[in-house]
Image: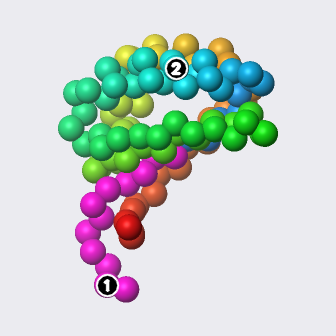
Amino acid sequence: MERIAPSCFTVTTVVPVEPESIDDLARLFDDTNRALVAEHDDWLGAWFTADRATNRVTVIARWRDPASYQRLRESAEFRTVMERFETRFTGPPTVTINEVLVEM
């Protein structure tokens, strides 16, 4: 496989949450995320997913440049929004950043 310059990166966040909070968190994500990323040209989109059997949510966001995500994550606005989510977390989020190598 020939290595090409990455077209984007994924930022995957997995977090355990309180039982029965998944739908409320999905609504909160839908209500807050668009405004949060509106000024970030490198943001390409996101999925909010859930495993109801284990009470874990996974957000997979696509970014052109992971440094843009880091700037968002360090912003006061991001921290303020995250405070609304964290009241329903039962453990710390795990965040990984991966280069997209193949897209189909």
Tell me what residue is drawn at x 60 percent, y 18 percent: 24
Tell me what residue is drawn at x 43 percent, y 17 percent: 31
Q: Is residue 54 above or below residue 7?
A: above
Going by the image, does 32 lie left or right of 83?
left
Query: Residue 83 at what x, y percent from top left?
Result: 55, 15
The answer to whether residue 89 shows anywhere in this view is: no
Instruction: Return the residue found at the far bottom.
Output: 1
Callout 2 environment at 10 Å: few (<14), some (14 to 19), or many (20+)? few
Q: Amino acid at mark 2?
A: Arg
2 or 1: tag closer to the N-terminus: 1
10 falls in the magenta region: yes
Which of the 4 image quadrants contains residue 3? bottom left
Name the residue tied to disc 2. 27
6 falls in the magenta region: yes
Marks 2 and 1 sit apart, C-alpha to C-alpha, by 41 Å
Q: Nearer the viewer, mark 2 or mark 1?
A: 2
What SS does tag 2 mark?
helix
Name the residue tied to disc 1. 2
The answer to whether residue 60 shows anywhere in this view is: yes
| Residue 32: image tag | none
Going by the image, does 81 lie left or right of 25?
left
Tell me what residue is drawn at x 71 percent, y 28 percent: 17
Q: Amino acid at mark 1?
A: Glu
Magenta span: 1-12
Q: Main secondary structure of the magenta part?
A: loop
Assign the N terminus to one quadrant of the image.
bottom left
What SS does tag 1 mark?
loop
Q: How is the image coloured?
A: rainbow
